[in-house]
Image (tube, helix red, strand yellow):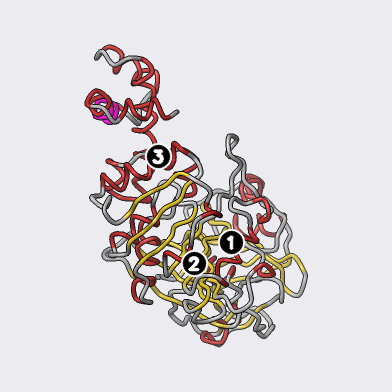
Amino acid sequence: MDLEQFAALRTPEGSAALDAAARVAGGDPLTAAAALRSAGVPAGLAAAALTQAELRRRAAGKFGPAATGMFFTRVGLEQATRGVVARRRAERLRAAGVGTLADLGCGLGADALAAAGAGIRVYGVEADPLTAAMAAANAEAAGLADLFTVECGDATAFDVTRVDGVFCDPARRKAGTGRRIFDPNAYSPPWDFVTGLAERVPHTVVKVAPGLDHALIPAGAEAEWVSVDGDLVEAALWCGALAEVPRRATLLREKEGPVSAVRLTGSGDAEAPVGRPRRFLFDPDSAVVRAHLVAELARDLDATLADPSIAYLYGDEARPTPFARCLEITDVLPFSLKRLRALLRERRVGRVEILKRGSALEPEKLRRDLKLAGDEAASLVLTRVAGAPTVLICRPLPA
């Protein structure tokens, strides 16, 4: 899509095309396109409307009902922050006294809209003209155009003395191709500029990829990893006055009932004790693992590792925790396909869940090789114990 096509979608005819596209989206794309053309929608406008309808359908998981009135690009939607995460960040900024915020590289405006919804005046800067236009349209659709304005330009040229807080989500995909960028120095804005913001603005937050190397975390910054309903979705660096602890894992739940949040904090450099596998296995949430807080969780659970490089914890009691899933171990075996297959057949196991850490085995290939038959179920954990390939046969416990 280009600016001209986007402008066409903003006309009454474009709005009608979007409404028609929403009614046929999600099915066969050729049938949907034919339906719009038969309704008299020009081919170019129909294509643009159908693209938006499909992106809005995908965006519902991130933005909920608000997605039906928003505009998206494919790359912008992929990088956009989930609504529940953006709202929580906005609440923390507001609680810290941030009244004006620069969103440098605001993309489609997900974080800026959440901040504006919390009463913060937001100045967005976006380099791509189409994305900037969509962000402004999204602010208008949300009724927040008076609190969130967008300028198309270079984020590095924005005068940050105008604000008391900065949020930056540097682009981690190549313009035009959408390919992921793994070198932070190739981000846009570049990493040196992003990390330097903390020295210029008292309240700075930087959104980063969950796989961020801990060596890149600026001294004195709080690094936070966030999961939503068990899925690791992002990491963020809280700098300056916003930094409260060295490392934080935040787990959000929104599938059932009101949104809830739990947090685990620590230094990020503690080491958990190592011992033998015990009766219960704890599989930590990915946010805990990425934040290097497994040792803190081990302390809370009175648990140990069975291998210093594998983030499975073992305990004698099934202690309840929101930070890990608990399974009861029935067997600990040196890995042998023949022996495992025979044991599962003897127990009439026909369904298995396969978890793995520290194993090169491919779960789906193993599932085929096991040739399962029976009406019982089990969980298999492929891992290492004291460096040796090991399989644990387990049964999950209720949450």
Please state which of residues 359 and 71 is positioned toward the viewer in this rendering.
71
Amino acid, disc 2: Val
Residue 1 visible at all:
no
Please state which of residues 46 and 320 is positioned toward the viewer in this rendering.
46
Mark toward the viewer: 3 or 2: 2
Q: Report crowding for label 2: few under 14, some 14 to 19, many 20 or more residues within 10 A (C-alpha).
A: many
> Decide: marks 2, 1 in contact (CB < 8 A)?
no
Amino acid, disc 3: Phe
Mark with earlier residue (3, 1): 3
The N terminus lies in quadrant = top left
Amino acid, disc 1: Val
Q: Is residue 19 magenta?
A: yes
Can you give x and y, in whole percent of width and height, for residue 189 in the image?
A: 58, 53
Residue indicated by mark 1: 194
Residue at x-position 29% and y-position 27%: 21
Residue 378 against residue 399 in the figure, above or below:
above
Judge left or right: residue 344 versus residue 137. Answer: right
Q: Disc 3 and disc 2: Cα gap in Å? A: 24 Å
The local secondary structure at tag 2 comes to: strand
Q: Disc 3 and disc 1: Cα gap in Å? A: 25 Å
Residue 110 visible at all:
yes
Q: Which residues are magenta?
A: 18-22
Q: Quadrant of residue 330?
A: bottom right
The local secondary structure at tag 1 comes to: helix
Q: Quadrant of residue 67?
A: top left
Q: Which mark is residue 315?
A: none
Can you give x and y, in whole percent of width and height, for residue 163 in the image?
A: 42, 66
Residue indicated by mark 2: 205
Q: Report crowding for label 3: few under 14, some 14 to 19, many 20 or more residues within 10 A (C-alpha).
A: many
Residue indicated by mark 3: 72
The C terminus lies in quadrant = bottom left
Chief SS of the magenta region: helix
